[in-house]
Amino acid sequence: MTTTGSGEHLPPALRTEALEQLLTERGLIDPKVMNGIITEYETNVGPLNGARVVAKAWTDPDYRRRLLEDGTAAIKELGFSGPQGEHIVVVENTPSQHHVVVCTLCSCYPWPVLGLPPSWYKDPAYRSRVVREPRAVLSEMGLELADDVRITVHDSTSEVRWLVLPERPAGTEHLTEEELVPLVSRDAMVGVAKVEAP
Amino acid sequence: MSAPLDIEGPTAPPRTNGELLFSEPWESRAFGMVVSLYEAGRFTWPEFRTALVTRIRAWETEPARDEPWHYYRLWLAALEDLLVGQGAVSTDEVTARTRDLAQRPPGHDHRDGHDHMH
């Protein structure tokens, strides 16, 4: 069950190509459609989308309220939807409460707002350790949280994808929504970093 | 609505915080096949997720691993499991086609990560 049959020693690139050929011959996939999907994820779907959501929530209290009530709908307002975005729940970090996201079983991740996950998010070590010792893992990733900050780890399920609404950093009160967007990092929206003032 | 794209910063496409989305072209093809088939309604996302979880768990619980952690290998295997289970392809024919491709003379196996059917 852990190998791909007798083809295990052939390079995965060739096995992928073989599968693509068979599926194309059977009319199950269209390489042109597939190229379009890959290009879309390589160029358009990424953490910039999530950064726009966060910056809007920071500057528009009504939007922030809608985002925390129904993440999927509020995110769709900005035009972001698609696979792994069917049910996005947004949790808000505060000075006393920190949220961090993981998928312990595989790699579930809110694609429409963050794009595809980075390799550390898929790594067996992060997936198993962040649940057991979140404070230590966050510290290793460069985020030191005071002992009195409560940490909640959100494990993705087959239905729910999580997005962290980071704290707006002090000293950014004068910045506009557009100026805030580039400050918001992917890591902050997964909960393994904070947003820093410029 | 269209903010200038951040080319170097943390939200820069197509890289995510400086990390390439796919380390090899075949990974993007394996990814694209899954999303294509999902969008065409060949399987639901929870069905693919279950197949992927099964493959990941098998790798993680294997006492003597003969392969290092490689996420897209498991992703590809999960896709194949799902398609074999549906009867869309068989393991033997995928293996046979893979062997055929391996027989190509040198210079004919340089994929560019794009449409190779023309």
Image: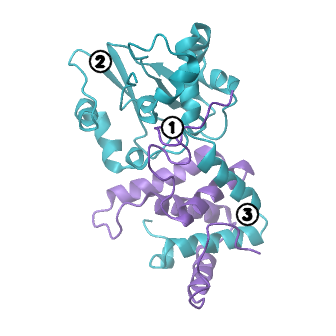
Whichever of callouts 3 and 2 sits on the residue coming sooner in the sequence is: 3
SS type, badge 1:
loop
Residue occupied by mark 3? A31
Disc number at residue B11? 1
* For discs 3 and 2, the disc positioned in front in the rendered view: 3
Q: Which chain is purple?
A: B
Asked which secondary structure carries label 3, the reply is helix
Q: Are marks 1 and 3 on the same chain?
A: no
Q: Is residue A7 left or right of residue B59?
A: right
Residue B52 position in % (x across, y down): 50, 53
Q: Chain of mark 1?
A: B
**Three-letter amino acid code of the residue under disc 1:** Thr
Chain A rendering hue: cyan
Q: What is the CA distance from the residue labelled 1 to the residue labelled 3? A: 29 Å
Identity, as a three-letter code, of the amino acid under mark 2: Arg
The reply, left or right, for residue A3 in relation to residue A79 is: left
Tell me, yes or no, whether the two marked residues, 3 and 2, touch with CB atoms within 8 Å: no
Image side of residue B99 versus residue A147, left or right:
right
Image quarter hosting the N terminus of chain A: bottom left
Q: Which mark is residue A1?
A: none
